[in-house]
Amino acid sequence: MRERNARRVKKDNTMFENITLLKKELDEAVNKPYIWELLNVAKEYKSNVEDFSLQKIENSLRLRNNEMCSEWFARKVDDLKREKNKKNCSSLFGEIRAIDNCYSVWYNKLLPSQKDEGPDFLAEDGLSWIIEVNTPSEAADAKSEIEKNCKSQRSPINFEIQEICPFGTPPNSRKDKHDNVQGEAVSKIAQIKQDEHQFKEDKINVLYVDLLDPIAFPLNIMDEQYSPLIAGNNGFFTSGAIWWAMYGKKRDPIWCEYAGWWGARLPYIMEFNGKLNKKSKIDFVVFSLPSKTIVFQNPYRKIPPKAILTMTKWNDFSLNESWLDVGFGCFRKKIVLKKLEIHRFIKAMEKNK
């Protein structure tokens, strides 16, 4: 997850009318500086994450007058006024971003929570749904030292490089464990909502992961992390952190910038099972990213076809990048075969380097 400081695009700031009204309500909020940073519509140049986050909030705020949502919004605004903790503020905005996406799936059958305890959203459409929202926050050790005065072989222009690890940098003191950035990300993503106490065995359970916090993810570095194997520049290959956090198993290798010709770094070996395992009550994990929504299905849960088809209704849903049993059969085998394909590919590179 290594990024050069990206060129940012100038955005039109005239479209955020609802956010402007919200900021007036939050003018005396306890955590106003942090909230203003999250709602910085006046910023001349915004990253894709910043811009898409603001668009999602703006779209969600249009539901404030909806009969099913008005009380929920009033409670969230009151919470934002009083909240001192930055992480909790980010979580509240994650829920606000999520409600518009959830409404696009269930419309007036969506039931926002009526109290602070319990699931974030319920839905009844002939099936009973529980939707829990999680907004990962920035790890304390998310950014490395900036490498300054770097030079490209093709250009005399100096630039800076900084390695961004939103889920934290890996430990370097564990002998023979070969910890790497991807392994750390896989571990942290797999631990999201680990206790699953809000989910019920007899419901359709959805974990909605909001990756649009512009402070935790200042650049769109989670793009492609939903792929099993990512092809990088110069023949490097990396295990996709999201995919392996969902479907990885204990002792699976997690590669970080592998290249067979290069004398590759050894992979991190998973010490845990991925999130969507035999014991999990979660049926689907939904990842909200800039310009796309990607869904992963639990291969061990018995899920009715109607529920699978419902998961294709998200705003910006990407079927090609999601892992859903849309063929209604052999889904677990598809995951196993993908792992085998990657294993044989890496083995072939080893043999021919």
Image (cartoon, rainbow, N blue to C red):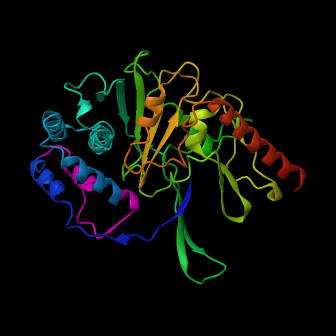
In magenta segment, residue 130: no
Q: Is residue 259 left or right of residue 45?
A: right
Q: Is residue 35 magenta?
A: yes
Q: Quadrant of residue 98?
A: top left
Regarding residue 330, the answer to whether it shows in the image is yes
- State the residue at coordinates (61%, 33%): 247
Q: Nearer the viewer, residue 51 or 60?
A: 60
Viewer-side residue, 318 vs 186: 318
Is 310 placed above or below 49 here? above
* The C terminus - image quarter: bottom right
Q: Which residues are magenta?
A: 29-50
Compared to 1, does 13 lie above or below? below
Q: Residue furthest bottom?
A: 156
Q: Residue at x 75, y 36 (%)?
A: 176
Q: Is residue 171 visible?
A: no
Q: Quadrant of residue 206?
A: top left
265 left or right of 298?
Answer: right
Q: Quadrant of the N terminus?
A: bottom right
For the residue pair 73 and 156, the one nearer the viewer reads as: 73
Give how far across and how far down residue 224 sits, in percent.
56, 52
Q: Position of residue 30 (x, y in %)?
A: 16, 43
Q: Position of residue 148 (x, y in %)?
A: 54, 69
- Residue lying at 65% horizontally and 38% vertically, measured from the top left: 173
Query: Does 22 sit above or below residue 131?
Result: below
Q: How far across and down, in percent of the image, does residue 9 sit?
A: 37, 71
